[in-house]
Image (cartoon, rainbow, N blue to C red):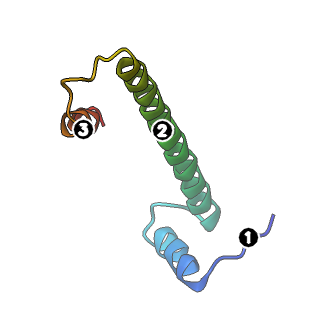
Amino acid sequence: MHVSLTEKLEDYVRQKVASGLYNNASEVIREALRLKIATKESDEARLQRLREAIDIGWQQAERGEFADYSLEKSLAKLRAEG
């Protein structure tokens, strides 16, 4: 497989190899891809939790349970939960 990088990315890869943290450019690229995959999975998990919270909120609203709730309180709770 051949991968083309911008000059900026090539410089970054070279710096990482030169730092001694990686033995070669392939290790840098593999690590970058692993981190990208982990970030995507984390983002998807957070999005799923948000969707579940929204579904619960809709169900509570349909039952009239949000009469006392303010939007600010709800957003604060979601932010606190991460």
Q: Which sits earlier in the primary sequence, circle 3 or circle 1?
A: 1
- Tell me the residue at 18%/24% (across/down): 68
- Tell me the residue at 52%/50% (across/down): 35
Q: Which residue is mark 2?
A: 47
- Per the rendering, the mark at residue 71 is 3
- Tell me the residue at 48%/43% (across/down): 43
Query: Foreground: 68 or 80?
Result: 68
Name the side, left or right, on which 23 lies relative to 76. Answer: right
As helix, strand or loop, the secondary structure at mark 2 comes to helix
- CA gap between label 1 and label 2 equals 31 Å
As helix, strand or loop, the secondary structure at mark 1 comes to loop
Q: Could you tell me which quadrant the N terminus lies in?
A: bottom right
- Per the rendering, the mark at residue 67 is none
Indicate the amino acid at tag 3: Leu
Q: Residues within 10 Å of mark 2 (few under 14, many from 20)?
A: few
Query: Foreground: 43 or 8?
Result: 43
Q: Which residue is mark 1?
A: 3
The quarter holding residue 75 reads top left
Indicate the amino acid at tag 1: Val
Q: Is residue 78 above or below residue 31?
A: above
**Mark 1 or mark 2: which is in front?**
2
As helix, strand or loop, the secondary structure at mark 3 comes to helix
